[in-house]
Image (cartoon, rainbow, N blue to C red):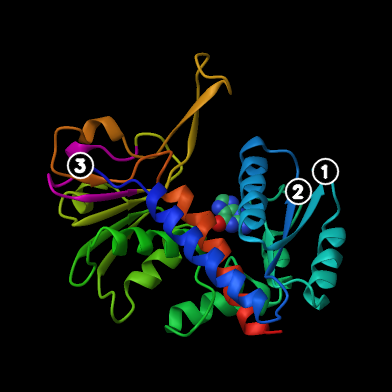
Amino acid sequence: MRRLGCKKIQEKIELELKAKTDSFVAKGNRAPSLAVILVGHDAASETYVNNKHAFCSRLGFLHFDYRFDEDVKEDEILSLISELNARDDVDGILVQLPLPSHIDEKRIIEAINPDKDVDGFSPVNVGRLCLGEDCFIPCTPKGILKILEYYDITTVSKKIVILGRSNIVGKPMAMLLMRKGLDATVTVCNTKTPDVKEYTADADIIIVATGKVGTLNSKMCRSDAVIIDVGVNRIKDATREKGFHLVGDADYLSFENTDCQITPVPGGVGLMTVSMLMENTFIAAERRGN
Ligand code: GUN
């Protein structure tokens, strides 16, 4: 098995982005800026949001932190988004998902100005992605492409199976891999796929993004498959200071005595997602200029 760790890729991207940011600011431009909205107190979401702010600080980005209790009214979030859309000192806007069930996620995402939608979730950016046009590419799929590029794994003419059809990962990933230049043959499985193994057993690359522990194991894959594990699942663990440890959606240990290549959790895709958010925020700032 070959471990496709992402720490080195993250460090490389961070160095490059820091240099680009320093030079952008030295030319008299305001530093790139990101506004992050978090509703509720989900521990995992709080960690992700804190990581985003910490990354912004390291790069010298401006960042604005908006946190609301679980019972906040949808209108309050909508009026904040409207204010952030209009503000000249905000390049990127991110609303951490998932949102509480009384808030209409679709309405919130649609309210974000597509030019500030650094997540690439708004209908305009999704449409552009499908059409192969220039757009904000969602951070996790964009990060997965960086991993494949770093490890010299081509997608051209490859059979790629995606497990999970979410708007955040599965769907945009499929759209990207179908693009000219990436040229993969893509299959997307979902919870109603009768026999997932029928597809995974023949795949060159498998991207697992189901949010379920043990979705994929080595018996379901070719002995030389590439596995990209998007899952981040907390397993209770009294031996750890935090009371849990993280595992992916794939059964990592089952791949140990195979020729497969697999991204670890932690230390894999998650590191790329936040790096790509920074890259998208920098792109938004560059487009704005001055
Ligand atoms: N929740 C899980 N992943 C993401 C992401 O990439 N962006 C946002 N906004 N929320 C998330």
Real-space Cα separation, disc 1 to disc 3, in angstroms: 43 Å
Q: In the picture, residue 146 is in which quadrant?
A: bottom left
Residue 58 included in the magenta stretch of the image? no
Q: Is residue 37 left or right of residue 282?
A: right
Which one is earlier in the sequence, the residue at label 1 or at label 2? 2
- Quarter of the C terminus within the rendering: bottom right
Q: Which residue is mark 1?
A: 69
> Which residue carries the number 3 mark?
220
Residue at figure coordinates x 82%, y 72% from the top left:
82
Nearer to me, 259 or 13: 13
Quickly name the residue at label 2: 39
Measured from the top left, where is residue 152 in percent x and y?
A: 23, 62
Is 278 or 110 nearer to us in this picture? 278
Magenta extent: 215-228
Q: Secondary structure at mark 3?
A: helix
Q: Tell me what residue is drawn at x 17 percent, y 37 percent.
A: 219
Q: Is residue 256 left or right of residue 61?
A: left
Asked whether residue 221 is drawn in magenta, I would say yes
Image location (x, y in percent) of residue 222:
14, 47
* Residue 173 marker: none
Q: Compute the Cα span from label 1 to label 2.
A: 6 Å
Q: Which amino acid does the dot numbered 3 rest on?
A: Met
Residue drawn at the location 18% of the way across and 39% of the way down: 1
| Residue drawn where x is 68% and y is 66% of the image | 109
